[in-house]
Image (cartoon, rainbow, N blue to C red):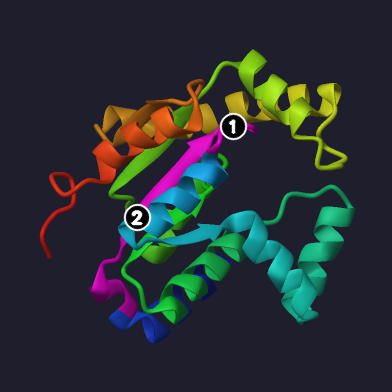
Amino acid sequence: MGTVVEASNKDTNGSFLNTNPTVVFVLGGPGSGKGTQCANVVQNFGYTHLSAGDLLRAEIKSGSENGTMIQNMIKEGKIVPSEVTIKLLQRAIQENGNDKFLIDGFPRNEENRAAFEKVTGIEPTFVLYFDCPEEEMERRLLSRNQGREDDNIETIRKRFKVFLESSLPVINYYDAKGKVRKIDAARPVEDVFESVKAIFGPKNEKAD
């Protein structure tokens, strides 16, 4: 399966791989405030925000053959293969025209991470990790009250457990390479953004 993706990658993405976009992975547990801070970074630093979940949902809505396959897998409780998600991310990067991207909620696990680097040839510039205690994330999700069915206490705890088991190995992998920028996300939104700004500010943005 990998060989087909790699072959098409070489055929169609030569110029894409040469442009060497800046990619920042944004990770954090459910309720850690990733979405809010991504919106701030987009507004202040000109990044494009890509959410793996949003791309999958958009593909399902499009009614494409790929979208139907994704929908069926989700219905059956199966995990969508890494390469499907990666191809959607890759296409979004290619079609966007920007050269700076926040990829939110991906990679979810080590297998995602290894497949992304292998298929796209891109390593993230760094990983923005929103570190937030479980009790605080729980409090935020329960008070969010947006009628999301996955915002009940049992589901929240399950999602948190999955995050710890799956995503922490990814964070540890990049941490060993000196690529993790850890943010204390338990503070008020404005304080968190001050820390985020310090990471994305001019001294950290390499001159093109």
Give the magenta part as a residue range: 16-33
Q: Is residue 140 left or right of residue 193?
A: right
Which structural element holds mark 1? helix
Q: Amino acid at mark 2?
A: Asn
The quadrant in which residue 148 appears is top right
Q: Amino acid at mark 1?
A: Ser
- Residue 79 location in percent, x, y? 73, 49
Q: Please tell me whether residue 118 is drawn above or below residue 186 in the rendered image.
A: below
Can you identify the residue that label 2 sits on?
44
Can you identify the residue that label 1 sits on?
166
**Residue sticking out furthest to the front:** 190
- Residue 82 location in percent, x, y? 59, 55
Query: Is residue 200 visible to us here?
Result: yes
Q: Please tell me whether residue 11 is drawn above or below residue 201 in the rendered image.
A: below
Is disc 2 surrounded by few (<14), some (14 to 19) or many (20+) residues within 10 Å? Answer: few
Mark with earlier residue (1, 2): 2
Image quadrant where one finds the C terminus: bottom left
